Image (cartoon, rainbow, N blue to C red):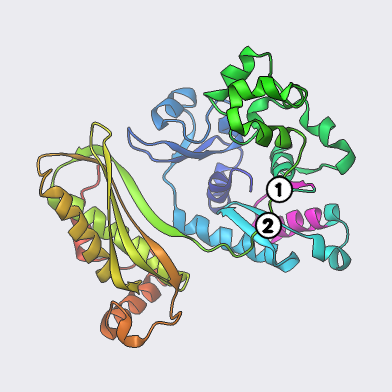
Amino acid sequence: MDAFYASVECLDDPSLAGKPIIVGGLGPRGVVATASYEARKFGVHSALPMSRARKLCPQAKFIRPRMDRYREKSAEVFLIFRDFTPLVEGLSLDEAFLDVGGSLKLFGTRRTIGRQVKDRIKRETGLTASVGIAENKFLAKLASDVQKPDGLVQVDPGKVHQFLDPMPVTRLWGIGKKTAPRLRALGILTIGQLRQTDPSMLQTVLGNRSEHFLRLSRGEDDRKVKPGRADKSISHEVTFDRDLLDLDELLAELQRQAEAVARRLRKQELMARTVVVKIRDPAFHTVTRSSSMRACSSNTKTLYRMARALFLNWRETHNSTPVRLLGMGVSGIEPAGSGHLAGDLAENPAEQAIDRVLDSINLRYGKAGLVHGQTLRRRKT
């Protein structure tokens, strides 16, 4: 998808169309989640500190992310994908691999399918997508980025070197800020130059990964599309605009995160066995604490009770340590009802009924719905 979060904001507020939009944390410690193409012209990109983004593009519209809305639009897009093939591997809310090898007789050539996918996304969601078509995942991913936004690029088997060779070597997965300067010192700036370099010379820089990068430089990638990959974990975290020491505020934030995590579990008809709490102090020391339950759960009260106990255990020896970042998540995820006996569940029927009522109300009213009272102790800064 093209600048997905920013595009959804434009869809919901047409007055933003054509203007620079930056979505991300709005506090002094916030970072950019995504930026519209108008904002990218000023050097704004994802993961950039928001303070820097404000200096580069002060005229932009700055928007706090609305993850529930983005998940809703993502679900619409993925339904379209699955109309063309069951072999859909989601990488994130806005990106996926589709294996259409078994769909050619139904829908036509790969290029025809790519065009149909793009057209349906635009018609049914109001958003644009860029499609890359190739013999493997690596090439398809690169092709999808070449003509953004609203692009469609196909890499034919006989033109792989022609496509790859001019690209900077940093387009290879795994070559980043540390490795690129060392390759540059050898005179290797492009993928083509790396492909033609003596393997023994590459080993001095890339070590035992040199053969892996040589395969990529030749356009070789034998990974299969893995459909239906379930979430291995679900989590929420926040970096506070100011370091927090107040216990009520910290527990209120933990309650809010437990609500969000539990709601996502129930929406996907999942349950989790392990609860994890993540804490970072002002010196950037980060600790995680985890605990597993006897049985899986998706109940808000149960997950919060576990997270609260983990946090208070840390707090006992750090009661004078402010918190910069607080996060809560779950792992050990299983489909709801997968072999569990009613007596093995961690919550009772009454608590399950309360969750169902809350979910129903919040589905209808969104942010105007219901939250647990404790979350209101979290002061907005």
Which residues are drawn in magenta?
113-134
Task: Determine whether, in the image, residue 124 is placed left or right of residue 159.
Answer: left
> SS at mark 1?
helix
Q: Is residue 264 visible?
A: no
| Quadrant assignment, res 344 | bottom left
Q: Magenta includes 377? A: no
Residue 156 screen position, x and y as percent: 86, 43
Q: Could you give the CA–CA distance between mark 1 and mark 2, rounded to whole angstroms?
A: 8 Å
Q: Check the image and report above or below for 313 versus 282.
A: below
Task: Determine whether, in the image, residue 10 is placed left or right of residue 369.
Answer: right
Identify the amino acid type marked 2: Val
Q: Which residue is mark 1?
A: 137
Residue 154 screen position, x and y as percent: 82, 44
Residues under numbered marks 1 and 2 in contact, where contact means CB atoms less than 8 Å apart: yes
The numbered mark, 1 or 2, whose residue comes first in the sequence reads 1
> SS at mark 2?
loop
- Which residue appears at 65% of the width and 30% of the height? 210
Q: Check the image and report above or below for 242 versus 133.
A: above
Q: Magenta includes 130? A: yes
Q: Which residue is mark 2?
A: 225
Q: Is residue 77 visible?
A: yes
**Dot 2, how many residues are within 10 Å of its Cα: few (below 14), some (14-19), or many (20+)?**
some
